[in-house]
Amino acid sequence: MIRETLVTTLSPEGAVHIAPMGIHVLADEWLILPFRPSTTLDNILATRHAVLNYCDDVRIFAGCLTGRREWPLVPTERVPGQRLAAALAHAELELVRVEDDELRPKLYCRLIHEANHAPFRGFNRAQYAVLEAAILVSRLHMLPWSKIESELDYLRIGLPTPAGPQELEAWEWLMEKLDAFRLANPERVAER
């Protein structure tokens, strides 16, 4: 099973990094698979800890992909780190082993502590659309442009009715990033 989370890590100097990431939940371990190069990868290898933040504010997912990384944080309880103040729940992890890979190393972690902070009432269709659009934006350099356009056309269906101000703001941030990529990479857009 993969859970869409926001991973917070610390650099050796104590700087917090926030990254949206799908985390694999195994029988008794958590598997983090960051692509190289990655600040998340560097931080986990250096400090051997990570924090998973379960959050329903989709602006944070979209914000991290569009250069908006300043979100309120609070200290973690059992491992060195910070968690998002907006997290509905969080899990504090410790790295136990690494399977190195040129593209995407496998970081196996064990759970040290987890806590619930507020109830999760589910995602509405607009929140789901923003999360899926965020995943597409994170892969602009990997996916064919035609796939990105067709997926976004489908995701737009979920926006109008359930979207509130947060979802609309997050969607706009992602579309700005998409437009900037389109302008900077006309050869990719021309590929069909």
Image (cartoon, helix red, strand yellow):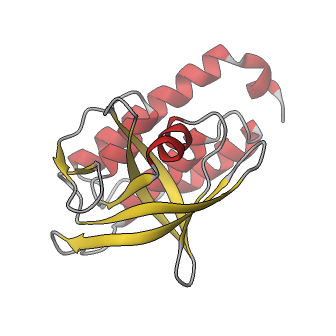
Tell me what residue is drawn at x 43 percent, y 51 percent.
130
Tell me what residue is drawn at x 54 percent, y 45 percent.
45
Q: In the current view of this chain or complex, which residue is farthest to the bottom?
A: 27
Q: Nearer the viewer, residue 98 or 17?
A: 98
Up-down relation of residue 141 to residue 62 (above or below):
above
Up-down relation of residue 115 to residue 76 (above or below):
below
Q: Give the image location of residue 44, x and y in percent.
A: 49, 47
Q: Give the image location of residue 62, x and y in percent.
A: 40, 41
Q: Which quadrant, please, contains the N terminus?
A: bottom right
> Would you identify the image quadrant in which residue 117 lies?
bottom left
Q: Is residue 158 left or right of residue 75?
A: right
> Would you identify the image quadrant in which residue 128 lies?
bottom left
Q: How many marks?
A: 0
Q: Give the image location of residue 98, x and y in percent.
A: 65, 57
Tell me what residue is drawn at x 63 percent, y 23 percent.
182
Q: Nearer the viewer, residue 107 or 34?
A: 107
Q: Is residue 163 left or right of residue 111?
A: left
Up-down relation of residue 171 to residue 57 (above or below):
above
